[in-house]
Image: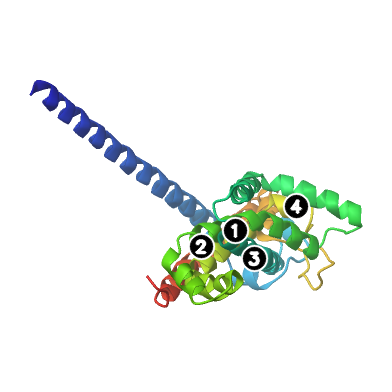
Amino acid sequence: MGMKKNRWQRRHLVEAFMQLLMRLSLVVVAGSLGLILWTIIVRGLPALTWDMITQSPKGGFYMGKGGGVLNAILGSLYLAGGGTLLALIFSLPIALYLKTYLGDSKWGRYVRLSLDVLWGIPSIVYGAFGFTLMLAIGLRASLLAGIIVLALVELPIMTRAMDEVIRRMPADLEQAALALGSTRFEVALRVITRQMLPGIVTAVLLAFGRGIGDAASVLFTAGYTDRIPTSLMRPTASLPLAVFFQLGTPYPEVQQRGYASALLLTIIVLLVSFGSRWISGYLNKYTIK
């Protein structure tokens, strides 16, 4: 009886310790997010004006004079939107092929491992690769080059997220479709894609959120300019680089604008995150459980 009682006490002590550890982890995560938001709101909100959102930088902007970061806002949206669209064109077929034809085979595991490795590669490495590729083909720093590199950054993220979602699809649906005479391609296109649409949309928006906040990969490829992007072959600004350049100046007023730019970027990312959850919840009503 004594040994059973001691064992019972040890189990409850371990459970209590793990509960405490999980609660502390929750406090650390939530506290870190709250501290980040508080810092950029307190420092950036006073400098966030309508002119800053609706105007491009004017002469002397980086020394505290008039203008805004409209060029960086539009540039970030163009870069992330184009990169996400390009990545989607390749990611969805790869994810469907993994589910439909490779499954859990040796080649399927190898492809997933390769995507995980690509996911873990730092963005600056993608930027260096893109810069080398640009030199090889004679492409200058431009919106197009930034889109291509961001698509490479987002590709493994989007593909693996889609793959994990698609693998959760009830096997009965796929087997029923095959039993009715559908080909594997028809099952992938008409059954898997429709059934897992909420997860696919979430994966796309997750990759978009990563792309719009990435600075290292576009530093060498998209360049930077004070003008609003009007061509794929011209350099473009981005909000992460706008934050970097403004915080790097010795002028306190410009540094405050840097925090305001960071606040704008955070708001966009939060809107994307909340939007993905809302869209996923809305589309879930039309899927088979």
Disc 2 to disc 3, C-alpha distance = 12 Å
Residue placed most toward the observer, 181 or 84: 181
The amino acid type, in three-letter code, at marker 1 is Leu
Secondary element at tag 1: helix
Does residue 87 show up? yes
Secondary element at tag 3: helix
Secondary element at tag 2: helix
Q: Earlier in the sequence, mark 1 or mark 4?
A: 1
10 Å neighbourhood of mark 1: few (<14), some, or many (≥20)?
A: many
| C-beta proximity under 8 Å, tags 3 and 4 | no
Q: Is 12 on the left or on the right of 159, as rendered?
A: left
Task: Please state the horizontal and vertical placement of residue 211, each as a whole percent of the image.
Answer: 64, 59
Residue 230 lies, with reference to residue 123, above or below; the image says below
| C-beta proximity under 8 Å, tags 2 and 3 | no
- Residue most toward the top? 2
Q: Which residue is mark 1?
A: 98
Q: Which residue sits at x=58%, y=74%?
A: 186
The disc placed on residue 166 is: 2
Q: Which residue sits at x=55%, y=61%?
A: 162
10 Å neighbourhood of mark 4: few (<14), some, or many (≥20)?
A: many
Task: Please state the horizontal and vertical placement of residue 133, each as a whole percent of the image.
Answer: 84, 52
Q: Which residue sits at x=58%, y=73%?
A: 183
Q: Which residue is mark 3?
A: 93
| C-beta proximity under 8 Å, tags 2 and 1 | yes
The disc placed on residue 219 is: 4
Disc 2 to disc 1, C-alpha distance = 9 Å
Q: Earlier in the sequence, mark 4 or mark 2?
A: 2
